Image (spheres, rainbow, N blue to C red):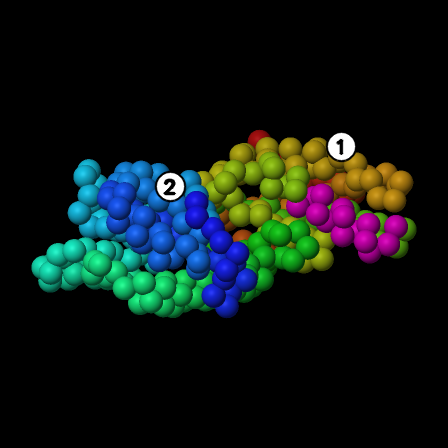
Amino acid sequence: MITTDIDDFSQPKRPYILIVEDSPTTLAVISSHLADHVDIISASNGEQAWELIQQDHDIKLVLTDIVMPGMNGHQLLVKIRKSGDPRIANLPVFMMTTGVDITDKHLAFLNGVSDFLTKPVDPVELQARINVHHNLARTILELEESRNTLKLLATTDPLTKLYNRRVFFEEGEKAIFTTLRYKTDLSLILLDIDYFKKVNDSYGHHAGDIVLVKVSQLLSSLVRHVDIVARVGGEEFCLLLPGTNRLGAAVLAERIRKTIEAATTSVDEHIIKISISAGLVTASSENCDKFEDLVKIADKRLYLAKDSGRNRICVSNDGKSDYS
């Protein structure tokens, strides 16, 4: 890597670029043009460059020759643009060639090249173009990060990091549609923490928050990756279980109940033990085709579980926990 203490760029961090060139002489010339302005890593062919791009997350721009042994510049560009990793797919890529054939230029732009340079490269032009594209790429990355942050805020509960109520109902509507169309199973577990107000009153809201986070972590650890776990109220959680029948959902609900009952939470030298009550519903067992109706049934059974003594699950409208 070639580095200097001189930095003519306005950004806090110097661009870190990959030069892909099989000619040592050309590599040395280009490196000398850029040494005062960027940090450099090099590869002598497309295969080596592709390995470096995948491994080195600090690479911010690729400057590649077209004609190389093995994987040429066009093939490398295509691999970059077709990558499933947004970091790689969005890399600025410059192409260099000594030829005058317009076909190479057209093909490069069709494949998504960021810029095209003809050898011998003018050092001032090269530095200016790198500066422009690096700043543009950084701006795009910042916008993408902002978009992801906004999406996260809109879809997750800030305390527990579970999905929020809005996402839960959106996913529930999709799930009930799939269930009715393809005659598959769909179950729903609605649960909340017993006597949660006493936790807040006795130990403070900070303790209550710690308990909520602990419950969310336990719930997440007990479900499959296809299941949806959401915080839908203060101490209320909901689990959406696609492809799960009544028995499977009841077994999971009981496992959750026992796991939470056995768990302890330490807060300021206090040991807090809690329990949960849960209502369960399975779409194939009910005469309804709307997700909100399933939620209402689960909610009714949750309150039946509470009225029956708490720390239990309810799977029917008569308050029973028998699911056989």
Q: Is residue 271 visible?
A: yes
What number is the disc on residue 262?
A: 1
Q: Is residue 185 visible?
A: no
In terms of depth relative to the viewer, which is nearer, 226 or 318? Answer: 226
Disc 1 secondary structure class: helix
**Which residue sits at x=69%, y=37%?**
257
The three-letter amino acid code for the residue at tag 1 is Ala
Q: Is residue 43 left or right of residue 184?
A: left
Q: Is residue 137 left or right of residue 313?
A: left
Q: Is residue 314 magenta?
A: no
Percent position (x, y) of residue 57?
45, 47
Q: Quadrant of the N terminus?
A: top left
Q: Nearer the viewer, mark 2 or mark 1?
A: 2
What number is the disc on residue 299?
A: none
Magenta segment boundaries in residue numbering? 203-216
In terms of depth relative to the viewer, which is nearer, 20 or 166? Answer: 20
Instruction: Give how far apart the Cα atoms at labels 2 and 1 are.
Output: 49 Å
In terms of depth relative to the viewer, which is nearer, 70 or 179? Answer: 70
The three-letter amino acid code for the residue at tag 2 is Leu
Percent position (x, y) of residue 86?
39, 53
The kind of secondary structure the magenta stretch mainly shows is helix
